[in-house]
């Protein structure tokens, strides 16, 4: 943090979990023989994440280092960050759509829905929504893990991670815009404007100004279909009916996806932007 604070636009992103506390609790729960998804969540309780968020804010405040708290699963996280920003700490929060749409106790989920940080309960999910709608969360991440097929044999040795990026927009349109009053302006801020500004890519990204990259996604808010997963990784939305699907994608001014078809000639034309100049 001391080094990053000296960099122009330097920022430290942190996965906040106290794995020492989690390790102690895990040993106790493993001894019970439990294999349900809730057991994994209970082995990494809310306190593990909240403690580390508090500690990272404490260190960011003292080093004057900009901090991004990634894939936040606990409702208290955005509140703590908002309190810190009010006293001048440069801290922002990301959450993921799976923490906004799923819980560890959903009856159709098993150990294959293991994620780190874990899915929480209904209370934490609703608390995250309150923080998001109140503007305390600055971005939505994917934490997309399309590799390592799940074995579904042992909870404690199962690899964590699921896929979901393909359905992020319809998930947020259905559960946020249509279900909770999230505005389209808030959605585009979370998906584009705010993270672009946070990581120094604005206005090239996150803007429709003249001279910026013409990267656009056209969404049909009325289109409804069910989730079908035919790729790598584990999907926790199979069969869900969602509205608000992408129907056209423009990359640098070129239509690369339309009417369900990808323009294969567009492969290799993208530019990797790893950091601001």
Image (cartoon, rainbow, N blue to C red):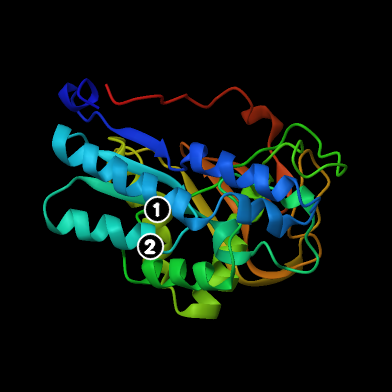
169 with respect to 54 (left or right)? right
Look at the image and tell me whether residue 197 can be seen: no
Query: Helix, strand or loop at disc 1?
Result: helix
Q: Position of residue 136 (x, y in %)?
A: 31, 62
Look at the image and tell me whether residue 56 can be seen: yes
Q: Which residue has dot 1 on it?
A: 50
Instruction: Tell me which corner region of the image, top left, top right, bottom left or bottom right, holds residue 138.
Output: bottom left
In the rendered structure, are the residues bearing label 2 and label 1 in contact, judged by CB atoms less than 8 Å apart? Answer: yes
- Precedes in sequence: disc 2 or disc 1: 1
If the image is split into quadrants, where does the C terminus sit?
A: top left
Q: Dot 1: few (<14), some (14–19), or many (≥20) neighbours within 10 Å? A: many
Measuring 38% from the left and 49% from the top, which residue is drawn there?
A: 51
| 133 shown above or below 211 | below
Q: Using the image as rendered, state which of residue 73 and residue 222 is in the foreground.
A: 73
If the image is split into quadrants, where does the N terminus sit?
A: top left
Q: Position of residue 87 (x, y in %)?
A: 11, 55
Measuring 22% from the left and 20% from the top, which residue is drawn there?
A: 3
Gap between marks 2 and 1, in whole Å? 7 Å
Q: Position of residue 153 (x, y in %)?
A: 88, 42
Q: Using the image as rendered, state which of residue 217 and residue 181 is in the foreground.
A: 181
Q: Which residue has dot 2 on it?
A: 76
Numbered mark located on residue 98 in the image: none
Query: Helix, strand or loop at disc 2?
Result: helix
17 with respect to 204 (left or right)? right
| 146 shown above or below 177 | above
| 65 shown above or below 259 | above
Measuring 19% from the left and 22% from the top, which residue is drawn there?
A: 7
Q: Dot 2: few (<14), some (14–19), or many (≥20) neighbours within 10 Å? A: some
Measuring 38% from the left and 62% from the top, which residue is drawn there?
A: 76
């Amino acid at each position: 943090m001391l080094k990053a604070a000296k960099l122009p636009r330097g920022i430290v992103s942190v996965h906040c979990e106290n794995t020492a506390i989690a390790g102690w609790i895990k040993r106790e729960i493993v001894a019970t023989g439990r294999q349900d998804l809730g057991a994994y969540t209970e082995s990494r309780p809310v306190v593990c994440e909240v403690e580390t968020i508090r500690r990272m804010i404490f260190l960011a405040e003292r080093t004057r280092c900009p901090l991004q708290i990634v894939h936040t699963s606990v409702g208290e996280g955005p509140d703590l960050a908002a309190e810190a920003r009010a006293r001048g700490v440069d801290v922002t929060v990301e959450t993921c759509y799976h923490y906004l749409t799923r819980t560890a106790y959903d009856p159709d989920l098993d150990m294959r829905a293991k994620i780190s940080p874990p899915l929480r309960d209904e209370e934490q999910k609703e608390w995250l929504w309150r923080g998001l709608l109140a503007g305390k969360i600055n971005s939505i991440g994917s934490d997309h893990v399309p590799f390592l097929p799940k074995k579904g044999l042992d909870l404690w040795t199962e690899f964590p991670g699921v896929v979901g990026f393909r359905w992020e927009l319809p998930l947020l349109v259905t559960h946020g815009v249509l279900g909770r009053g999230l505005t389209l302006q808030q959605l585009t801020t979370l998906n584009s404007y705010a993270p672009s500004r946070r990581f120094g890519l604005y206005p090239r990204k996150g803007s429709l100004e003249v001279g910026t990259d013409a990267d656009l996604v056209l969404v049909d808010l009325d289109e409804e279909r069910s989730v079908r997963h035919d790729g790598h990784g584990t999907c926790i939305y199979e069969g869900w009916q969602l509205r608000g699907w992408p129907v056209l994608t423009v990359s640098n001014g070129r239509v690369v996806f339309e009417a369900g078809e990808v323009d294969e000639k567009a492969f290799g034309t993208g530019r990797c932007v790893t950091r601001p100049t």
